Image (cartoon, rainbow, N blue to C red):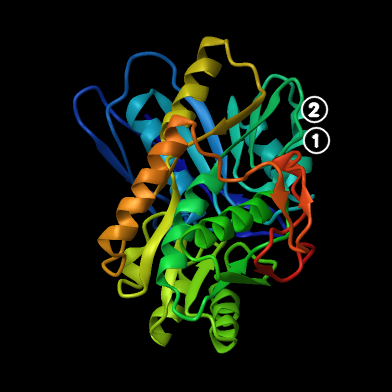
């Protein structure tokens, strides 16, 4: 495979720093140091034939050990299992300016482009219209076209299980939740988490603070501190940084993370997290694009498919809680348990039909805070 690392050095000018590609030989690896930033990449031996050019655009740094890091691990899995030439852009702001980024990648010959954040949806859709021969795939969105599809996974399944760990850990029955944006994926995650907490602790409540960020460690740490000051003794999050967990650790509280196993950042606070494995899906899509058989649509991975899981438990999760969570996980995988029941009781105590979870705009009973931000 070939791998190129592009780093955006001037966002407003959208000046992309193109990193030199490292191309592996038939018998041994080669290493190339990038001209910009001194980034070093290693290219493994490649198969015969023309590599598929694949690009990834991330809203945060791939070193966040969170959302963008998880997608970068998926890209590395793709590189290890297919003859591809990859490029990734990190810390690209959401919004209209990102359309130029997608179009530049398409003009550079990338056949398959992944955009891994919700706010890329409309810009990618516009870029896809201008480059009909390129396949665009958008993570977490819902708009599509003949050459643009969507993909995501049932994080709510992992959220429910992590909520069970939080519900068992809280002593004061108040769990703080540092949340990014009031969009359906975040709302259904909070709801599933709350229902999981209430399964093991019916008195548990979840208080939400919105940050309007995906990756802003100081702001997210401050939000966690505000929840601790309000009496929360467990912190959960829908963020890409470990700052909420580090804040919880400093306060002697517990922490449920997201995206990856972040134990290293707050080992005493750590309980578990909903985590991702994007690699097999990226490989499946790339192989289909190369074969000319891929049809963009909406893909939604689950625990049963392996896209979603939970991270290893922290030392403070007792054996009884671990066993209960594993039993519930087996039922989720088997399809005999739904983490979002229908009907469902909303924040005001009203029973309502669950409806389309991809358009979810309400909180369940037990959540403190506004679902509109």
Q: What residue appears at the point 44 percent right and 73 percent down from the top-left corner?
A: 245
Q: Relative to 329, say whether 211 is above or below.
A: below
Task: Say which mark, if any, is on residue 126.
Answer: 1
Q: Position of residue 177 (x, y in %)?
A: 58, 69
Q: Position of residue 292 (x, y in %)?
A: 57, 10
Task: Say which mark, if any, is on residue 5.
Answer: none
**Which residue is outermost to the bottom?**
229
Q: Quadrant of residue 9?
A: bottom right
Q: What residue appears at the point 37 percent right and 35 percent down from the top-left corner?
A: 77
Looking at the image, residue 7 sits to the left or right of residue 295; the answer is left
Q: The N terminus lies in which quarter of the figure? A: top left
Q: Position of residue 45 (x, y in %)?
A: 27, 27
Q: The C terminus lies in which quarter of the figure? A: bottom right
Q: Which structural element holds mark 1? A: helix
Label 2, residues with CA under 10 Å away: few <14, some 14-19, many ≥20: some
Q: Which structural element holds mark 2? A: helix
Which of 364 and 245 lies nearest the eye of the viewer? Answer: 364
Q: What residue appears at the point 79 percent right and 56 percent down from the top-left corner?
A: 350
Q: Quadrant of residue 179?
A: bottom right
Q: Relative to 48, say whether 190 is above or below.
A: below
Q: Position of residue 338 (x, y in %)?
A: 55, 40
Q: Quadrant of residue 267?
A: bottom left
Q: Relative to 227, say whether 18 is above or below.
A: above
Judge whether residue 110 can be spotted in this image. Answer: no
How many angstroms separate mark 2 from mark 1 (CA)? 5 Å
Asked whether disc 2 touches disc 1, contact meaning CB atoms under 8 Å apart, the reply is: yes
Which of 271 and 90 lies nearest the eye of the viewer? Answer: 271
| Number of disc labels | 2
Looking at the image, residue 77 sits to the left or right of residue 232; the answer is left
Residue at mark 2: 129
Label 1, residues with CA under 10 Å away: few <14, some 14-19, many ≥20: some
Judge whether residue 248 can be spotted in this image. Answer: yes
């Amino acid at each position: 495979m070939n791998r190129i690392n592009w780093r955006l050095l001037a966002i407003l000018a959208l000046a992309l720093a193109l990193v030199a590609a490292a191309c592996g030989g038939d018998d041994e690896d080669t290493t190339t140091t990038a001209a910009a930033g001194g980034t070093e990449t290693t290219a493994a031996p490649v198969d015969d034939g023309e590599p598929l050019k694949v690009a990834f655009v991330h809203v945060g740094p791939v070193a966040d050990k969170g959302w963008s890091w998880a997608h970068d691990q998926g890209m590395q899995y793709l590189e290890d299992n297919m003859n591809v030439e990859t490029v990734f852009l990190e810390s690209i702001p959401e919004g209209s300016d990102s359309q130029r980024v997608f179009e530049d990648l398409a003009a550079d010959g990338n056949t398959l482009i992944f955009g891994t954040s919700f706010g890329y949806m409309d810009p990618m859709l516009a870029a896809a219209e201008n480059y009909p021969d390129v396949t665009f795939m958008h993570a977490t969105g819902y708009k599509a076209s003949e050459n643009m599809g969507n993909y995501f996974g049932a994080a709510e399944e992992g959220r429910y299980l992590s909520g069970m760990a939080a519900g068992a850990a809280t002593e004061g029955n108040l769990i703080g939740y540092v949340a990014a944006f009031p969009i359906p994926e975040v709302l259904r995650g909070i709801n599933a988490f709350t229902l999981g907490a209430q399964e093991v602790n019916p008195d548990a409540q979840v208080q939400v603070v919105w940050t309007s960020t995906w990756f802003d460690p100081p702001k997210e740490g401050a939000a966690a501190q505000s929840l601790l000051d309000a009496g929360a003794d467990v912190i959960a999050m829908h963020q890409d940084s470990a700052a909420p967990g580090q804040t919880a650790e400093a306060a002697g509280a517990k922490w449920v993370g997201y995206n990856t196993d972040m134990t290293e950042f707050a080992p005493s606070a750590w309980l578990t997290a909903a985590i991702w494995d994007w690699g097999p899906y990226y490989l499946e899509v790339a192989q289909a694009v190369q074969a000319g058989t891929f049809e963009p649509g909406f893909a939604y991975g689950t625990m049963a498919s392996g896209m979603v899981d939970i991270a290893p438990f922290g030392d403070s999760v007792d054996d009884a809680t671990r066993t209960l969570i594993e039993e519930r996980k087996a039922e989720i995988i088997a399809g005999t348990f739904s983490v979002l029941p229908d009907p469902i009781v909303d924040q005001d105590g009203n029973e309502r039909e669950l409806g389309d979870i991809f358009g979810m705009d309400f909180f369940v009973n037990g959540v403190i805070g506004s679902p509109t931000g």
